Image: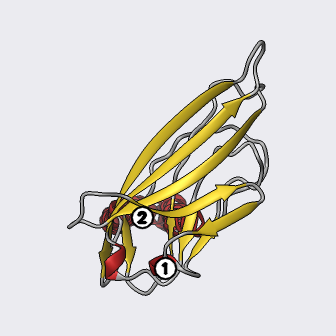
Amino acid sequence: MRGLLSCLAVLSLFAALTVVSSCDVTRVGVALVRIKTRRVCPCRGGCAEVDSLTEAVAGDGFLLGCISCKRREEVSARTIVDWHFKPPAEDQFTHIFHYDHPTSDILHPDFSERLEWRGTPDVDVQVGAVFIKRVSFNDSGTFRCTFHRTLFLLPENQQVTVEKEVELTVVAEANRELTSVIAEIMMYVLIVFLQLWLIAVLVYCYRKIWDEHEARQARKGLKAPTSLLETKDTCDGVQLE
């Protein structure tokens, strides 16, 4: 009975681990989707300079990320953001987008009605991201993001210029991210390991139950001759009387 209860407990644990592993992989996938699709929050949280993604799928939308954090958050500032583009076959950058809160302007006909401001909706811009609609193969190339920041300091204001570049590659189909591939591999490895572990536990439980059964049968076998001897002695006493 104890062996059977132990096996049931192990099976319950295995089922729980399988559900947890599946849930963890699902949560990772959902988290990745949320990271890709979320918009920039207009709140005043901590700033971290994260590089932009560099691979877009033709026909889909793509977020060109560009972040420039201030060294001192308590200092007020006003920032103007400009985006430039250079195709692979050219040497000069072309001015394509200008943002000066609250207005944004598309300055090149190739990007007409295809660029949308997704950065900080404030004069103090730290996130200068723009969203490209209907990405085409002609969008492959180098995008340059320029922050023209005026820091309001005493005794005089300070001008700061920050430039960042994004090398964009446009592909026909999306390539799977390394994180997704690793998560799927780990999921299958975990499932195989748990199945092998379950088989080993079942074999162990079966052998344990069988050993208990054999021991019980052996005890019964030892008790049987003793009972026969006691019965014989009783019968002999009756005959003597």
Place residue 220 in its image quadrant.
bottom left
Place residue 197 in its image quadrant.
bottom left
Secondary structure type for disc 1: helix
Taking 237 as reference, is 141 left or right?
left
For the point 30% across and 84% down, which residue is it?
A: 172
Q: Callout 2 environment at 10 Å: few (<14), some (14 to 19), or many (20+)? A: few
Label 1 near label 2: C-beta < 8 Å?
Answer: no
Q: Nearer the viewer, residue 48 or 2?
A: 48
Q: Callout 1 environment at 10 Å: few (<14), some (14 to 19), or many (20+)? A: few
Taking 17 as reference, is 232 left or right?
left
Residue, far left? 89
For the point 75% across and 54% down, which residue is it?
A: 101
Residue, far bottom? 59
Query: What number is the disc on residue 109?
Result: 1
Residue that label 2 marks: 220
Residue 138 visible in the current orientation = yes
**Residue 165 location in percent, x, y?**
39, 50
Q: Nearer the viewer, residue 136 or 9?
A: 136
Q: Nearer the viewer, residue 107 or 3?
A: 107
Please tell me whether mark 2 or mark 1 is closer to you in this view.
1
**Residue 138 location in percent, x, y?**
32, 78
For the point 53% across and 41% down, which residue is it?
A: 49
Taking 86 as reference, is 156 left or right?
right
Query: What number is the disc on residue 146?
Result: none
For the point 78% across and 42% down, which residue is it?
A: 44
